[in-house]
Amino acid sequence: SIQFLYLPGGIMIMVVLATFLLQRMKFSELKAAVGESSRTLLGAGFVLMFTIPMVRILINSGVNMADLPSMPRAMAELVAGAVGSIYPFFAPSVGALGAFIAGSNTVSNLMMAQFQFDTAQLIGVSGALLVAVQAVGAAAGNMIAIHNVVAASATVGLLGREGTILRMTIIPTLYYLVVAGVLTMIAIHGLGVTDPMMLAVKP
């Protein structure tokens, strides 16, 4: 079954119809607007053809007949062994990398939250804090997410100048990630921040 009002596309169609009625548009104007928007969406949405399958494979990789660990767990074990206690500094950058690859803060969190939590458990730090920092890094990564840059460029008529935009946005992104990483290290190793549930069970 299809829940029409649950899907973003269904809501957008309703908005188009409401706009058509409220603005008293002609059918020729509606056709021109839909055509222009469709061309913009096709140019920007091409990236999704590659990101969505990758995300679904990563999320469901733990479901297999060979009883292998999921990709996030395997990555967490590798990172915990290689980086250890200084990993929290890089946790925001992992979130940003996920957003850069997937083109979305939300998708980055879906892909990487389990990885962050597993890594936190393996190195003995707050899982809640690393998952929160994952979201912070993913938000910063939105500035350099290819999908977002392409969509924004197409919207404002700068399609084809994505390289210039990326060179401009990488500077504030790096600043954001370094500051978030330093604050995370201070919170964990300086202030001794732990998981809320661990505090709740203490006598």
Image (cartoon, rainbow, N blue to C red):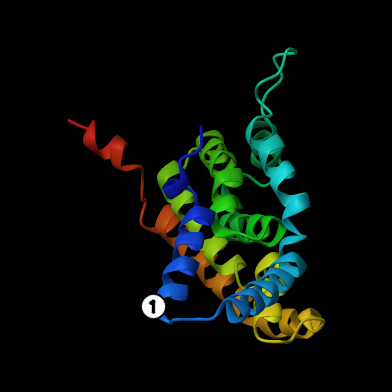
Q: Amino acid at mark 1?
A: Leu
Quadrant containing the C terminus in the rendered view: top left
Q: Answer above or below: position of 108 versus 183.
A: above
Q: Is residue 71 left or right of residue 104?
A: right
SS of the residue at dot 1?
Answer: helix
Q: Which residue is mark 1?
A: 22
User: Residue 43: percent from the left, percent from the top?
Assistant: 77, 69
Instruction: State whether residue 159 is above or below residue 186.
Output: below
Counting from the top left corner in percent of width and height, residue 20 is at 47, 74
- Nearest the viewer among 143 and 180 is 143
Q: Nearer the viewer, residue 166 or 152?
A: 152
**Residue placed farthest to the left in the image?**
203
Report the residue at 76% width, 59% height from top: 47
In the rendered image, residue 192, in percent from the top left (x then y), is placed at 37, 51
| Residue 180 drawn above or below residue 131 | below
Pick whichever, 36 or 181, lies toward us. Answer: 36
- Badge 1, how many Cα within 10 Å: few under 14, some, many 20+? few
- For the point 72% across and 83% down, which residue is it? 165
Q: Quadrant of residue 190?
A: bottom left
Is residue 125 depicted above or below 165 in this figure? above
Q: Is residue 152 left or right of residue 134?
A: right
Residue at 73% of width from left, 79% of height from top? 166
Residue 48 location (% of width, % of height): 72, 55
Q: Is residue 92 visible?
A: yes
**Which residue appears at 70% of the width and 80% of the height?**
153
Q: Is residue 110 left or right of residue 162?
A: left
> Could you tell me if residue 134 is visible in this image?
no
